[in-house]
């Protein structure tokens, strides 16, 4: 790992100045912005294909300036589809561009080693490759950090998020070996502040310097299939590993350290040991609801006023109504406009779990379907390895839109969540299709 420290120190000063400016400024929010014009053409409760290109259109393996083996397979493997297909999630960056972006990176195990970052910009409806992959990956690698200071890739599951305060894409772990499940409890944060336009490879290489790293956590929350959630009240993250985990941690991404790392951890007794659980934060009740659909149809809540209560402190939410077929590795998001958790796994069905009454601990939570009978668009793609946080909600002043992407060579889909306050416009078409 020699030769990495000078570059990291130089980059740390630049990133520190960006973070200082971000933290002291008023952070914009898509909740205050109107939805982009294309949302007006989607009827509430229906899906539309919205993207004007595909992720595969910006595959670095197809770029002779980036792939040293072009036109043969690159050193990071010719399998960009694993960015979406290999047990990976994503995050919605509210402060990227004019309308936010779905940001994704990942691969892991022996599926894919390209650590490039992608953004689907809702303003332009186009995929961008924000960075280029580290060109000569090899394993094992100390702490899952390549010699240039960028993180390696892993199966992110539901352990990838967005920090609105620092405007950063956040991966809660790195991968130090490629034999499966070999993760390091280091958080890798990619600042979306000060990015160069991702239209040249020189700019993409420069953008890779926007990665910053946490110290290594003393508590390992990274076991496969774990979950994380952003707590907007405390402005930190909570994370719990999958099967075999022994810890539940909080992570504050903002404090800068003398060694060039960022953030602080705090460990608590574990909350669950279930693989493929997902979680979302409810700011109304100040709790995280996580699911155990791999083994049971249960939804449990972590009361964040008592984070150290352990497994025995989990509150089982009492479900009523007609639930969908509950599958693990699903999308699970909080809807501010509906005050409900939103579930999606495959096909056209989008469902909510909404509290009835005022007591979230004891009153029932009712299942309802949100997909309208007149919907004609059904998202396609191979979802065998899960949706996780590739399903995200974009919140605007006049609408909420759920996003999902299932394949690198296919479209991004948007679902207009019913109940928004968007003003009436032209009668929407039956479907909206784009490449």
Image (tube, grey):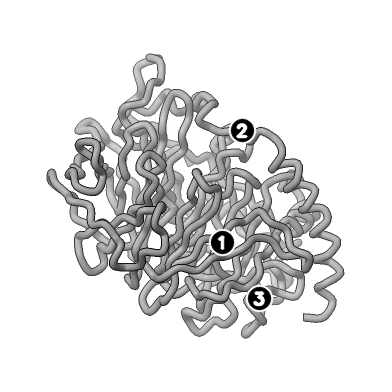
Image position of 292 (left or right of 270): left
| Measured Cα–Cα span from mark 3 to mark 1 | 23 Å
Tell me whether the residue at label 1 lies in contact with that at label 2, contact meaning CB atoms closer than 8 angstroms. Answer: no
| Above or below, comparing residue 149 to residue 139 in the picture | above
Residue 344 can be seen in this image: yes
Residue displayed at 75% across by 75% down: 147
Are discs 3 and 2 less than 8 Å apart at CB? no
Position of residue 234 measured from the top left corner of the image (x, y, whole percent): 52, 48
Q: CA distance from mark 3 to mark 2?
A: 39 Å
What secondary structure is found at the residue carrying circle 1? Answer: strand
Residue at mark 3:
75
Eye-nearest disc, 3 or 1: 1
In the picture of the structure, the residue carrying the numbered disc 1 is 171
Considering only order in the chain, which callout, 2 or 1, is on the residue closer to the N terminus? 2
Q: Position of residue 306 (x, y in %)?
A: 39, 57
**Badge 3 vs badge 1, beta-carbon distance below 8 Å:** no
Name the spot of residue 197 as percent of width and height, x first: 74, 44
State the SS at label 3: loop
Name which residue lies at 66% across and 33% down.
Answer: 26
Circle number at residue 45: none
Q: Element at badge 2?
A: loop
The numbered disc on residue 28 is: 2
Query: Which quarter of the figure has residue 427?
Result: top left
**Crowdedness near tag 3: few (<14), some (14–19) or many (≥20) residues, C-alpha within 10 Å:** some
Q: Quadrant of residue 345?
A: bottom left
| Quarter of the figure that contains the N terminus | bottom right
Judge by depth and name the residue closer to the eye, 219 or 183. 219
Residue depicted at 56% across the width and 61% down the height: 171
Give the image quarter of residue 376: top left
């Amino acid at each position: 790992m020699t030769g990495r420290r000078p570059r990291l120190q130089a980059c740390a000063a630049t990133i520190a100045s960006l973070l200082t400016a971000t933290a002291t400024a008023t952070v914009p929010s898509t909740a205050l912005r109107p939805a982009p014009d294309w949302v007006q053409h989607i009827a509430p409760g229906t899906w539309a294909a919205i993207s004007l290109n595909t992720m595969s259109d910006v595959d670095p393996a197809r770029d002779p300036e980036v792939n040293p083996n072009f036109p043969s397979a690159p050193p990071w493997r010719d399998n960009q589809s694993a960015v979406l297909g290999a047990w990976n999630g994503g995050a919605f960056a509210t402060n990227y561009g004019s309308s936010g972006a779905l940001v994704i990176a990942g691969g892991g195990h022996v599926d894919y080693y390209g650590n490039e970052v992608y953004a689907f910009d809702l303003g332009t409806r186009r995929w961008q490759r924000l960075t280029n992959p580290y060109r000569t990956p090899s394993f094992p690698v100390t702490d899952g950090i390549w010699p240039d200071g960028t993180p390696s890739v892993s199966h992110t599951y539901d352990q990838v998020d967005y920090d609105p305060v620092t405007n950063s894409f956040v991966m809660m772990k790195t991968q130090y070996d490629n034999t499966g499940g070999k993760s390091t409890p280091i958080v890798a944060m990619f600042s979306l502040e000060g990015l160069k336009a991702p239209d040249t490879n020189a700019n993409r290489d420069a953008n890779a310097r926007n990665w910053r790293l946490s110290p290594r956590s003393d508590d390992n929350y990274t076991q496969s299939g774990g979950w994380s959630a952003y707590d907007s009240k405390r402005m930190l993250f909570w994370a719990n590993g999958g099967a075999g985990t022994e810890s539940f941690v909080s992570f504050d991404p903002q404090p800068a350290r003398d060694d060039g790392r960022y953030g602080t951890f705090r460990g608590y007794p574990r909350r669950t040991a279930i693989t493929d659980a997902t979680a979302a934060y409810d700011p109304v009740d100040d709790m995280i609801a996580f699911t155990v659909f791999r083994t049971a149809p249960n939804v449990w809540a972590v009361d964040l006023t008592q984070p150290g209560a352990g497994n025995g402190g989990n509150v089982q939410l009492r479900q009523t109504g007609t639930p969908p077929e509950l599958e693990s590795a699903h999308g699970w998001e909080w809807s501010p406009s509906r005050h409900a958790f939103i579930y999606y796994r495959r096909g056209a069905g989008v469902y909510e779990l909404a509290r009835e009454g005022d007591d979230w601990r004891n009153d029932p939570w009712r299942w309802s379907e949100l997909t309208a009978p007149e919907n004609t668009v059904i998202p396609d793609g191979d979802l065998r390895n899960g949706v996780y946080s590739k399903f995200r909600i974009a919140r605007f002043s006049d609408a909420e839109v759920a996003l999902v992407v299932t394949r690198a060579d296919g479209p991004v889909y948007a679902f207009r969540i019913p109940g928004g306050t968007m003003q009436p416009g032209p009668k929407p078409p039956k479907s909206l299709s784009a490449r």
